[in-house]
Image (tube, rainbow, N blue to C red):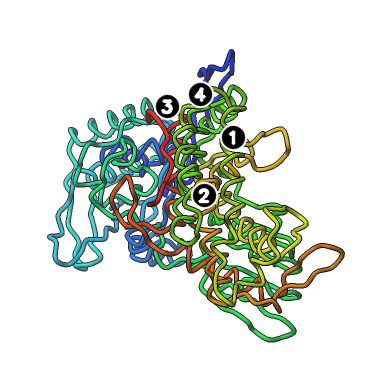
């Protein structure tokens, strides 16, 4: 994982982004090594894209013994920082052996499965050569270099040559040219290395070209989860590497911090500063919601990726991107029609919505597009009570008078408001993860001080995720009349009702489906992040067009 970013200063003129100058931060040795492996991966790392895969965790675990400098011995120095001013390079050596005033041996720890041979690769030689160059410039004599393969518990000596050092310096120059580019290199074409790459989930090499990926893209941490703190008066804190939620001295929850993908705070719940700081350091987004589900705000770490792309996003938002907005609206209408066809009795409305779905991609202006969206929404919500069938849902259907927002006058609207807020939180988290600004949108107006792009992104997921959860909750009896109360014309949910919806939402968003474009199984949560990254690619010009997710 790269801890530095490479900041460029740019000027914006007539909608164009131009490079003015470059701030020369030292280049990590690891980034040079990754350039040799894949230039696109190195570029993504240089703009701050981070991943956290099981593969990387294995490597971190293997390095854990040598990452603590305090455990260094008399002739063994661990986690030693090195630097070369001449090359503009910095890095860290796993282990350096030798006396303080004598010749040194550099030892690099590598993870290799036992079933594979402990073979020194070109990348290993490059890394050792760069570390050696740094040490020599720092005035130290280096007499040898070795690789220690943790899986085999075996050390292999590496005899570095003048050719190794020459190739290492050329690789540094190549890396510097790469990270100075304004646009990422094209992804590899059907390269076997992609399926094993830690950055495949952010690079999206096949998705970039809207091809069938022939593989499954999974979240970086498959067992990670969104933690919802929804018990009024409780406190979430960090204790010995675990997130704990307690109330009145009673522990309600305890999970390892590694398993927390994000935190959603509902209503009157306290969060300790230590937990907030740790989540920010890990680039885990925290979303705050009111007791009624309204998104109040969110927090994120300071080192957000894709800074230049974010500038481009604001330019595109100001100038307009009708093509992106068209796809989002068309996909929204298509998914609404599908949900209504599956669960309701409104064949005429579905047929009309299918025509509006096609009209959306032909709209000549944003005003025309909004008109198409409004007509489709009217048809959909007029027919919404036809999906609230069965005895358990009858009370909700009988009180429905159309879609009404805040305050919600009836149980179904109250449930929709709350579930939309949960979905909005996921969209915000996905946009933040790839460095986009949730406020600068293309369909919703950015002038209304709302997270416009997050609202844009959630449109195509409203029906298959949020609306589906609400319909199922009423039809299955998960939400009952006792879960709602009406005060001064405003329908409110009880604590039990909110927790039922949260539980149903998490079940739904973690459900896998076959992606209609890429052909692999993906959870709805992961699909939201994929779409966010496709928006990113469309904005920065690395892909031709944006396509929405539709279900049949």
Q: Earlier in the sequence, mark 2 or mark 3?
A: 2
Q: CA distance from mark 3 to mark 1?
A: 19 Å
User: Residue, x 17% and y 38% (percent of image)?
Assistant: 161
10 Å crowding of disc 2: few (<14), some (14-19), many (20+):
many
Horizontal and vertical percent for residue 422?
60, 59
Tell me, yes or no, if residue 513 can be seen here. Answer: yes
Q: CA distance from mark 2 to mark 1?
A: 18 Å
Q: Which residue is mark 1?
A: 443
Q: Quadrant of residue 284?
A: bottom right
Name the one closer to the observer, 267 or 388. Answer: 388
Q: Which residue is mark 3?
A: 541
**Taking 237 as reference, is 35 above or below it?**
above
Q: Which residue is mark 2?
A: 430
Q: Earlier in the sequence, mark 3 or mark 1?
A: 1
Tell us which disc is closer to us: 3 or 4. 3
Q: CA distance from mark 2 to mark 3?
A: 20 Å
Q: CA distance from mark 4 to mark 2?
A: 29 Å
The kind of secondary structure element at disc 2 is: helix
Q: Earlier in the sequence, mark 3 or mark 4?
A: 4
10 Å crowding of disc 1: few (<14), some (14-19), many (20+):
many
**Taking 208 as reference, is 262 above or below it?**
below
């Amino acid at each position: 994982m790269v801890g530095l970013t490479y900041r460029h200063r740019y000027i914006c003129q007539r909608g164009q982004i131009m490079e003015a100058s470059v701030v020369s931060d030292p280049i990590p040795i690891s980034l040079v090594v990754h350039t040799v492996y894949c230039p696109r991966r190195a570029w993504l790392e240089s703009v701050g894209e981070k991943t956290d895969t099981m593969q990387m965790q294995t490597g971190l675990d293997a390095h854990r013994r040598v990452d603590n400098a305090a455990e260094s011995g008399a002739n063994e120095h661990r986690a030693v920082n090195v630097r070369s001013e001449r090359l503009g390079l910095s890095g860290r050596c796993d282990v350096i052996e030798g006396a303080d005033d004598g010749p040194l041996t550099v030892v690099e720890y590598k993870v290799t499965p036992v079933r594979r041979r402990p073979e020194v690769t070109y990348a290993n030689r490059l890394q050792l050569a760069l570390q050696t160059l740094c040490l020599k410039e720092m005035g130290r004599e280096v007499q040898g270099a070795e690789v220690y393969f943790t899986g085999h518990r075996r050390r292999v000596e590496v005899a570095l040559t003048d050719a190794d050092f020459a190739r290492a310096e050329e690789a540094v120059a190549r890396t510097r040219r790469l990270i100075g580019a304004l646009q990422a290199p094209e992804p590899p074409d059907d390269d076997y290395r992609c399926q094993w790459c830690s950055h495949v989930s952010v690079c999206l090499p096949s998705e970039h070209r809207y091809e069938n990926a022939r593989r499954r893209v999974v979240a970086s941490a498959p067992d990670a989860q969104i933690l919802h703190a929804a018990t009024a008066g409780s406190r979430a804190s960090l204790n010995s590497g675990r997130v704990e939620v307690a109330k009145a001295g009673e522990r309600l929850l305890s999970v390892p911090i590694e398993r927390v993908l994000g935190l959603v705070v509902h209503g009157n719940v306290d969060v300790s500063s230590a937990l907030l700081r740790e989540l920010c350091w890990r680039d885990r987004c925290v979303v705050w919601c009111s007791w009624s589900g309204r998104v109040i705000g969110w927090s994120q770490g300071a080192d957000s990726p894709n800074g230049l792309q974010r500038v481009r996003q604001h330019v595109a938002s100001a100038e307009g991107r009708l093509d992106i907005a068209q796809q989002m609206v068309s996909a929204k209408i298509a998914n609404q029609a599908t949900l209504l066809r599956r669960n309701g009795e409104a064949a005429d409305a579905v047929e009309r919505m299918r025509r509006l779905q096609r009209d959306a991609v032909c709209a000549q202006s944003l005003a025309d597009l909004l008109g198409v969206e409004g007509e489709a929404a009217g048809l959909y919500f007029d027919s919404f009570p036809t999906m609230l069938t069965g005895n358990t849902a009858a009370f909700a259907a009988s009180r429905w008078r159309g879609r009404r927002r805040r305050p919600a006058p009836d149980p179904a609207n109250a449930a929709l408001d709350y579930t939309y807020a949960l979905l909005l939180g996921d969209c915000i988290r996905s946009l933040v993860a790839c460095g986009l600004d949730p406020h600068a949108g293309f369909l919703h107006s950015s002038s209304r001080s709302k997270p416009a792009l997050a609202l844009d992104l959630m449109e195509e997921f409203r029906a298959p995720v949020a609306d589906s959860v609400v319909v199922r909750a009423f039809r299955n009896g998960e939400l009952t009349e006792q879960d709602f109360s009406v005060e001064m014309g405003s329908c409110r949910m009880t604590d039990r009702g909110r927790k039922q919806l949260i539980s149903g939402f998490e079940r739904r968003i973690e459900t896998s489906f076959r992606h209609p474009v890429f052909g692999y199984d993906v959870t709805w949560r992961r699909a939201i992040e994929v779409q966010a990254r496709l928006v990113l690619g469309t904005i920065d010009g690395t892909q031709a067009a944006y396509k929405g997710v539709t279900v049949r």
